[in-house]
Every structure is written in structure tokens, then in C-alpha cells.
Image (cartoon, helix red, strand yellow):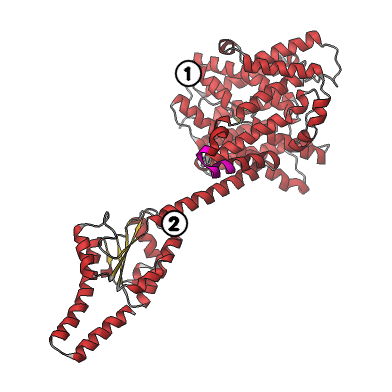
């Protein structure tokens, strides 16, 4: 196995150009995410550098570009607000400790090989969740858009909306609007030469410096001084009374980052026609986030837009991700002063465009046409993402989606359960010979055929048929088309077999092979029947059952022919006892 997944130097020119282009796009976004989180612009850059470098070095998606993203920043805004408010002295260090915890959890996810399960989520949940993230970003930028300080949470931002609108700072608002105009209106040919976020950042910052150089910070907030040189070390800081909260935030970051990264990995796979290693990607993201937290960087994940730009610019290997991080490092070390004059309103405009792009407009428009239940679930997840919290929204969404799926699967499984008592009942599935045997039995055989995987959802359908068993002399359970038998369904079959045996009915089990046979043996259901009643072929079971029935009837007919009333009564009583 390669130390660096997919690394080679045959595409050096493409990787250099892809990494450089991704860095140009990442710069304004990293600054914007840093300011939006409450930690500061430089911490956004540190996150882009460390997560970008180490996720590329140790990750499992060669062309992926990692760094701070909208969803991760939304969580970190909550973390910074909560921990700094409760711990003014150590809150910042505790917040970066949470970033480290998130990285450690991600490494653990990868080591436990959970990668393939994390993205097994219904699209309705993912859509509602991502749209909710987009809405949060939009709502949190209301204040900066109008020149006011950003709010720490959505409810506060929404409640202050009338105040912001009634008292705008016109210079800041004008710059934010111009930023949006450039972001949305930049021609494609120009965007290929200089990405629209960077163009908006340069143009609007120059306008603010030329036309509004002396505006006070209360009217036009700017990034201000940014430390140059290498970042300082943030050693882990814990507070016993808040360990539970910190672990919860860490798990939230890890889960969110894993989902965000692996979804981006799938996008990268579709573009490059390659296959990522999800567990390795989680380990790489975890290492990147752990080191980012150690050096005061925002947490990051695979960034879809930057990854797509990297691939389109020629990036194919992890070298492009590492070059992207090193270019940002050079900017921080040598050119940090160039970013000091950037207005917050310009960054708010950039983030509003990011929020709009994150919202799944395509599915929002047609969700109700696909399914009202799917639409309701998506809007529920969206609402809970915005007004409750991200992990609760995903957990509730997945739980409800699974309930709906189980209900639908149960109905399908129940529909695969067939009761056949006459030749015409199973016209499509029965052969001519089988129909003839059923005809000879004259309605005294109950052929109970199961098909497809039988989970706990099918147990109800099996149980509902139990009362029918006593009306027939022989029960044939046909499991030939059952590839999987759940415990609950197995126990329902056991109950049916026992009830039939208690009522002196003959029981045959047909076609139990492989995992189904193992399950029945482990539950000792097969041991309830004599070996001759466990057959591999349905015709064999029907022949034996018909022989039993016709044998009894022949005994009665023979007694009648000999005009032996005692033997007739005895045979009839025996047959009657069997039916009871």
C-alpha cells in the first residue's frame, strides 16, 4: 500500500496548476469562515493549511481539496460562542481542544472501518441537512451584510433582523451588494482566469480603501491585524464540568466532517472516474483536524467546490492538495498584511453566495412531486438543522426515514407470502405436476410459500396466517425463495410449526439452504420435525403429503368395501382426530 494514496509525479504540471487555483479560491473562503466562526480570519487560514496538507497526505481521495467548510464553520460558531461565554480565559483553547477531539473521533471511525456506513443516508435527509446549513449561513450573515456585528446563533440573528434593516451602514451594505453582484455576474471566461470570490474580494477591498479609508470600525468593520509567521501551539485544555459538552461537540464535528468529506469524495469519484478509500479518507481528515486544533486552526472537511475546481484545473493526485496548503502558508507567512483591510461585509457577501449554493434548490422545487412523505421529512430535517442542532436533525431524519423504509419493506415482504390450498391459487408459481398433486389432496394441504428476505416486518404476516393451519391436515412451509431469514421471522415460523404439531398436523419444511438452514438449525426448529419431513424440493413434499392423505382415505374406503363398520368407525375417528 502506498504511503500517500495515489501519489505520482506524471501529472506534475496539472497538480501544480490545480493546487494553485484551489488556493486562490480557498483564500477568501478561509478568511470568511474564520471571521464568521468568531475565532478570527487567521484561524480560518490555519485550518485551510493544516487540514488541507495532512488530509491530502494521509487521505484516501487523491484529488480532494480539504479545508474549512460551511457546515463545519456553523458548528464551530456554536462551539466558540458556548465555550468562550462560559470560560472567558480558556474558552478559545477549549474550543480548539474540541477540534482535536473531533479529529481523534474521525481517526477512530476510519480505524473501525465505518466509512462505508457513514454515507448510507437517505437523500431526503442529506438534502434537508445541507439546505439547513445553507440557511444557517445566510441567517448568520444578516448582521455583517448591513454593517453590524455577526450574531452567535440563528435565533438572535433572526430576532435582530428588523433592527439591522432599519439601521444599515450604507458603505458596508453597498460593498456587500457589490460583492454579490460580482459573485453572481462574473462572466465564465473571466472566472476561469480569476475565481469570482477572489475577484470580489480584491475589487471591493480596493473600493473600500480608496473611497472609505477613514470610516470608523463601527460603520465599516475590517479584518484588522493578522499575525504573521508560524502559529502558536494550543495544548489541550479540559474542564471537568464541561467534558460531556466537549465530547458531544467533538463527536458532532467528527460526524459532520465525515459526512461532508465522504460526500465530496463521491463527487470526486464521479468526475475522475476513480474509487476513493473511505476509511483512509476518514483517517486523513482526522489527522488534519487533530493537527489543525493543535495549532489553532478551524476544523475542515473535503470541500466540494474547491475539489471540483482543482480537478478541472488539472489536479489529479494528493500533490495538488499539498500545493494548495503550501501556497496558503506562504501567504500567511509573507503577505498577511495584505488581508488586513478586507471589510467584514465583503466576506459576508462571499458567504451568502456560499450559503445559496449549499441549499439544494433542485430537490426543494420537486420534492413534493416525488413524495409528500419525502418532502415532509426533508423540511423537518431542514427546520431542525436550523433551529435545534445538526446531529439531532440528522439522527431524527435517519430514524424516521428508516421507519418509513421498514414499513415499505414489510409490506413488500408480506406481499411475498402466499397461501396455496387449491391448484388455482398458485397458477403462476406451480408446475402442472404440483397442481395435480394439490388436486388429489382435495383442499387438505396448506402450502405456505415465502419469498425474498424475511425480516421482522414479515413476522406479522406469518403470524396472521397461523389460525388457518388447523383447517388443513398437512402444512408445507416452502422456503425455497428465501435468501435471508431474520430472527423474528424465524421465531414466527417456529410458533407456526409447534402449533401445527400440537394439533397433530403433518409439517414439511422445503428448500431451507445456506444461511436460512443455519438459522433454523441454531434455533432448533428443524429438530422439531422428522428428517423425512425436511426436503429440498416442493414436489417431494407434495407427494409425501398427498400419499399421507390418500393413504388415510384408502384405509376408510377399504373398510367400507369390506362392510366392516367397526374398522370404518375406527379409521374415520383416526382421521377426525388428525384434523383436530
Residue 413 position within the rendered picture, expressed as x and y whole percent measured from the top left: 41, 55
Q: Which residue is mark 2?
A: 455
Residue linked to disc 1: 9
Q: Are marks 2 and 1 in contact (CB under 8 Å)?
A: no
Question: Which of the labelled discs sits on residue 57, or is there none?
Answer: none
User: Which residue is painted at 75% across and 23% down in the image?
Assistant: 145
Tell me what residue is drawn at x 69 percent, y 29 percent: 138
Q: Secondary structure of the magenta portion, mostly? A: helix
Vertical side of 428 occupied by 108: above or below: above
Tell me the residue at 73%/24% (across/down): 41
Residue 67 is left or right of residue 153, and the answer is left
167 relative position to 569: left or right: right
The mark nearer the N terminus, 2 or 1, is 1
Stretch in magenta: 369-376
Viewer-side label of 2, 1: 2
Residue 90: where, in percent of width, then height?
80, 37
Residue 472, above or below 69: below
Q: Is residue 552 left or right of residue 62?
A: left
User: Which residue is rendered at x = 37% and y = 77% of the image?
Assistant: 502
Give whichever of 344, 557 is nearer the camera: 557
**Residue furthest to the top:** 210
Q: Nearer the viewer, residue 498 or 176?
A: 176
Residue 98 within the magenta-colored segment of the rendering: no
Residue 439, percent from left and from top: 22, 66
Amino acid at each position: 500500500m502506498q504511503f500517500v494514496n495515489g501519489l505520482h509525479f506524471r501529472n506534475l504540471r496539472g497538480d501544480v496548476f490545480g493546487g494553485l487555483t484551489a488556493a486562490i479560491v480557498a483564500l477568501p473562503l478561509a478568511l470568511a469562515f474564520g471571521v464568521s466562526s468568531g475565532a478570527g480570519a487567521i484561524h480560518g487560514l490555519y485550518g485551510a493549511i493544516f487540514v488541507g496538507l495532512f488530509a491530502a497526505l494521509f487521505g484516501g481521495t487523491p484529488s480532494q481539496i480539504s479545508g474549512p467548510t460551511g457546515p463545519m464553520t456553523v458548528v464551530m460558531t456554536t462551539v466558540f460562542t458556548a465555550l468562550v461565554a462560559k470560560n472567558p480565559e480558556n474558552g478559545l483553547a477549549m474550543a480548539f481542544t474540541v477540534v482535536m477531539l473531533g479529529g481523534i473521533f474521525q481517526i477512530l471511525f476510519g480505524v473501525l472501518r465505518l466509512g462505508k456506513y457513514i454515507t448510507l443516508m437517505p437523500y431526503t435527509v442529506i438534502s434537508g441537512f445541507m439546505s439547513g446549513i445553507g440557511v444557517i449561513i445566510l441567517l448568520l450573515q444578516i448582521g455583517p451584510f448591513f454593517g453590524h456585528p455577526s450574531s452567535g446563533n440563528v435565533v438572535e440573528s433572526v430576532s435582530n433582523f428588523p433592527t439591522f434593516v432599519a439601521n444599515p451602514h450604507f458603505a458596508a451594505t453597498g460593498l456587500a451588494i457589490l460583492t454579490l453582484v460580482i459573485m453572481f455576474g462574473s462572466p465564465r471566461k473571466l472566472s476561469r482566469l480569476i475565481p469570482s470570490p477572489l475577484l470580489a474580494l480584491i475589487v471591493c477591498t480596493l473600493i473600500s480603501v480608496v473611497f472609505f479609508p477613514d470610516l470608523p470600525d463601527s460603520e465599516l468593520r475590517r479584518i484588522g491585524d493578522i499575525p504573521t509567521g508560524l502559529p502558536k501551539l494550543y495544548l489541550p485544555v479540559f474542564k471537568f464540568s464541561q467534558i460531556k459538552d466537549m465530547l458531544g461537540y467533538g463527536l458532532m464535528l467528527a460526524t459532520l466532517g465525515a459526512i461532508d468529506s465522504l460526500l465530496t469524495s463521491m463527487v470526486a469519484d464521479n468526475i475522475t472516474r476513480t474509487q476513493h478509500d473511505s476509511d483512509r479518507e476518514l483517517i486523513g481528515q482526522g489527522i488534519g483536524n487533530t493537527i489543525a486544533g493543535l495549532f489553532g486552526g478551524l476544523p475542515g472537511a473535503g470541500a466540494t467546490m474547491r475539489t471540483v475546481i482543482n480537478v478541472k484545473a488539472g489536479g489529479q493526485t494528493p500533490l495538488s492538495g499539498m500545493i494548495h496548503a503550501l501556497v496558503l502558508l506562504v501567504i500567511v507567512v509573507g503577505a498577511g498584511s495584505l488581508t488586513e483591510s478586507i471589510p467584514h461585509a465583503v466576506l459576508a457577501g462571499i458567504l451568502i453566495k456560499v450559503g445559496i449554493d449549499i441549499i439544494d434548490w433542485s430537490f426543494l422545487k420537486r420534492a413534493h412531486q416525488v413524495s409528500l412523505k419525502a418532502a415532509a421529512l426533508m423540511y423537518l430535517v431542514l427546520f431542525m438543522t436550523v433551529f435545534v442542532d445538526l446531529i439531532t436533525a440528522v439522527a431524527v431524519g435517519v430514524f424516521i426515514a428508516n421507519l418509513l423504509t421498514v414499513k415499505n419493506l414489510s409490506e413488500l415482504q408480506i406481499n411475498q407470502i402466499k397461501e396455496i390450498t387449491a391448484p388455482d391459487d398458485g397458477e403462476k408459481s406451480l408446475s402442472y405436476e404440483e397442481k395435480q398433486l394439490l388436486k388429489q389432496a382435495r383442499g387438505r394441504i396448506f402450502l405456505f410459500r415465502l419469498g425474498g428476505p424475511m425480516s421482522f416486518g414479515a413476522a406479522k404476516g406469518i403470524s396472521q396466517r397461523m389460525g388457518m393451519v388447523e383447517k388443513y391436515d398437512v402444512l408445507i412451509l416452502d422456503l425455497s425463495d428465501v435468501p435471508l431469514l431474520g430472527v423474528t421471522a424465524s421465531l414466527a415460523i417456529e410458533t407456526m410449526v409447534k402449533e401445527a404439531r400440537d394439533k397433530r398436523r403433518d409439517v414439511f419444511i422445503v428448500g431451507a439452504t445456506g444461511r436460512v438452514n443455519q438459522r433454523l438449525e441454531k434455533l432448533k426448529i428443524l429438530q422439531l420435525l422428522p428428517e423425512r419431513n425436511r426436503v429440498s424440493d416442493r414436489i417431494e413434499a407434495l407427494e409425501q403429503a398427498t400419499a399421507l392423505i390418500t393413504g388415510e382415505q384408502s384405509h376408510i374406503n377399504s373398510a367400507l368395501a369390506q362392510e366392516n363398520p367397526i374398522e370404518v368407525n375406527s379409521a374415520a375417528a383416526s382421521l377426525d382426530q388428525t384434523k383436530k
